[in-house]
Amino acid sequence: MNNSLTKNCTNEAQLEKIRRGQELKFRWRDDWPVMEQEILKSGREAIAQFEQTHKPTQA
């Protein structure tokens, strides 16, 4: 799945909004559970990357 939806995801609340929006469009599909897991996985990876690059430096 293309992670363009989640590439700029910065927190869990934002990820949940993305997941809910996609669920409204695709929950009727047989492969929705797989799609949902891919969305969550790529979103959490984006959040982790965001947190790494925006980690406050300790003085």
Image: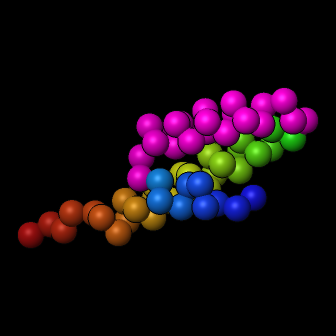
Q: Position of residue 44 (x, y in %)?
A: 54, 52
Q: Position of residue 19 (x, y in %)?
A: 61, 38
Farthest front residue? 25
Q: Which residues are magenta?
A: 10-30
Q: Relative to the observer, which residue lies in front, 51 or 4? A: 4
Report x, y in % for residue 34. 80, 44
The quadrant of the picture occupied by the C terminus is bottom left
Figure disc tally: 0
- Most extreme residue toward the right, as rendered? 30
Check the image and report above or below for 34 versus 56: above
Instruction: Choose top left, top right, bottom left or bottom right for residue 53.
Output: bottom left
Q: Residue at x 56, y 42 (%)?
A: 18
Image point (37%, 65%), residue name: 52
Q: Is residue 11 above or below residue 20?
A: below
Q: Is residue 13 a member of the stretch shown in magenta?
A: yes
Q: Quadrant of the N terminus?
A: bottom right
Dominant secondary structure of the magenta stretch?
helix
**Of 4 and 35, which appears nearest the observer?**
4
The answer to whether 48 is drawn above or below residue 37 in the figure is below
**Is 8 a magenta residue?**
no
Above/below status of 21 relative to 51: above
Q: Is residue 52 left or right of residue 25?
A: left
At a point 69% along the width and 30% down the height, the residue shown is 24
Asked which colour scheme the image uses, the reply is: rainbow
| Quarter where residue 6 is shown | bottom right
| Residue ranking furthest to the left | 59
